[in-house]
Amino acid sequence: MTDLAADRQLDHDVIIVGAGFAGLYMLHRLRSAGFSARVLDAADGVGGTWYWNRYPGARCDVQSFDYSYSFSDELQQDWTWSERYATQPEILRYIEHVAERFDLNRDVQLGATVLGATFDDAHSRWTIKLEGGQHLVSTYVVMATGCLSVPKRPSFAGLSDFKGETYISGEWPHHPVQLSGKRVGIIGTGSTGIQLTTAIAREAGELLLFHRTPNFSLPAQNRPLDEEFTRELKSQYDQRRQEARTTTRGYPVPPILSNLSALEVEHEQRLEVYEAVWRNGGPVFTSSFADLLTNPEANATASEFVRGKISSIVQDPATVEALTRFDHPLGTRRPCVDTGYYETFNQPNVALVDVHDDPIVEITADGIRTASGSYDLDVIVFALGFDAMTGALLRMGITGQDGTTLPERWSDGPSAYLGVAMSGFPNLFTVTGPGSPSVLTNMVMAIEQHVDWITGILEFARDQGTDRVEADADTEKLWTQHVVAIADETLFPRANSWWTGANIPGKPRVFMPYIGGLGQFQQVLDDVRTHGYEGFSFS
Ligand code: N01
């Protein structure tokens, strides 16, 4: 591949991998800055995670009007969201609209599976190898490959013996799936499994939810957005976005939240705050008080409140016990957000199968067998999560200078400067990579932040007359240590979460996202830029 890169003309200044929110905006920004760029995506349509995750009930639990691009005021004024939390089809329509509106599709190559990306040290170029034999050569590569884009696949014994239908949530088919009257089993109770549960319970003859570790789920309090709300929102959209960029989460939080310690206030006052935040809905519950994610005692008051809510909703005591046997403080795994999840267990056609102490042993021709019993099923749905944040990058066949591969480089866990670049991999950038706030925030705002910054550094390199940009190894190491150190000051590392890689057997355990929040991270990015992109070498 090296010779190929040397002999050939450059195909593009930048190859972008991934046609989701990140890749499409990257293309738009690079074009505006005068770079030639091409987006590659294995899917047959744009949308990234929202192209693939089309399972029943899929929707986003960040409010629609926040989980959307802010770069174009015309776009945000023209587009109207129908609900507080948008469904997958509505989000996909939005992304397709953006791709058309900004004429992006002509530079998007779909059905393009990347098999490898190799850096040619002598000529400072990347060669991208695609399935089918095509090669593309570019100066820069941007991996916009998503944080939750590699589903964890089922590896249960006997899987191939099953006579019924099986589905993986992140690879849901495009054709309608008929579940009415069938006996359906769902394995997995993260955000995906919980959304699937409420949707499938309305349709299936019988639904069995195979449940291993309880997750906290908070009510979405979803609602249609009426004209008055939308008019008011649009009249202040710009201010809302400005504020969002300074927040930890990437969207403004409701004023009912308190900035006191949960232990500083009387029991009654604490309950009032929790009740108000519960009624407001959404994933902001852990911001009810200032110390819920740093002080175990404070956190226990919130966990207890949620436990009480679950007990008051679910009628069967054994189900309550299984749903509330929490092994982690509230918020140290990504809280789920639901509409009627706990109520679903009161339906006569729904039952929880507790596989915590009675694990799934195998899948049989007829269904699922646990250590103590067998469950006949027509359909099994796997909602087992993702090889998050690093999965897509590690599978991309990335080889840097000196022939070092990314899996070799990250064998002890990921290390990246600002979540955007790795030493030894010049001219390669990642959008919302490990070491950036990404999955702890509103992803669309985090994507815009990274994409704008990457565009800036490429313009800077061009202005300097250079075409080789690399993160310094020492600076990268310091940043990676800082990311871990600030996470260690919180309760987050206590949980077996996908943020730490704990959900994937053999994955090095490192707390991957930057916990400081979007606003604080912006200050870091600004600081690095104003110091001439300190920590990067240009040659
Ligand atoms: O994945 P998860 P997810 N046997 O890893 C279980 C985002 N998201 O796709 O905890 C039995 O959270 C596993 O059990 P356990 C959001 O950021 C957002 O649901 O390992 N069970 C767990 O219950 C979210 O956090 C939205 O004991 C097995 C489940 O599978 C992230 O995606 C919607 C098992 C995996 O849960 C990931 O959520 C959807 C086994 N062998 C997703 N292996 C919204 O915006 C795994 N499990 C609303």
Image (tube, grey):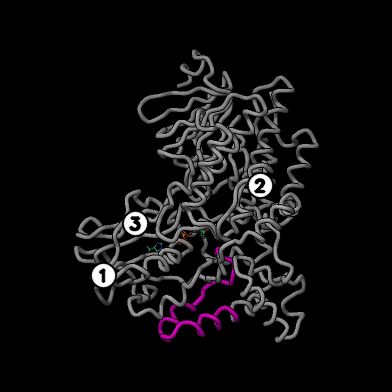
Instruction: Inspect the magenta stretch and tell me whether residue 461 lies in it.
Output: no
Where disc 1 sits, the SS reads strand
Q: Are marks 1 and 3 in contact (CB under 8 Å)?
A: no
Q: Position of residue 414 (x, y in %)?
A: 56, 46
Q: What stretch is highlighted in magenta?
A: 305-334
Verify CB contact (< 8 Å) between mark 3 and mark 2: no
Residue at (78% x, 42% y) in the render: 527
Residue 324 lies within the magenta run: yes
Amino acid at pointer 2:
Gln
Residue 438 screen position, x and y as percent: 61, 50
Between marks 3 and 2, how big is the CA–CA gap?
43 Å
Of callouts 1 and 2, which one flags the residue occurring earlier in the amino acid sequence? Answer: 2
Q: Residue type at mark 3?
A: Pro
**Does the beta carbon of the residue at mark 3 sit less than 8 Å from ligand 1?**
yes
Disc 2, SS: helix
* Numbered badge on residue 334: none
In the figure, 382 relative to 24: above or below?
below
Dot 3 falls on a residue whose secondary structure is loop
Q: Distance between the residues labelled 1 and 2?
A: 53 Å
User: Which residue position is annotated with label 2?
Assistant: 77
* Residues packed near mark 3 inside 10 Å, few (<14), some (14 to 19) or many (20 plus): few
The disc, 3 or 2, on the residue closer to the chain's N-terminal end is 2
Look at label 1 and name its amino acid: Arg
Residue at the image point whose x is 56% and y is 43% from the top? 21
* Marks 1,2: beta carbons within 8 A: no
Badge 2: few (under 14), some or many (20 or more) residues near its Cα, within 10 Å? some
The residue furthest front is: 227
Q: Can residue 204 be seen in this view?
A: yes
The residue under label 1 is 369
Report the residue marked by disc 3. 154
- Location of residue 290 (image quadrant): bottom right
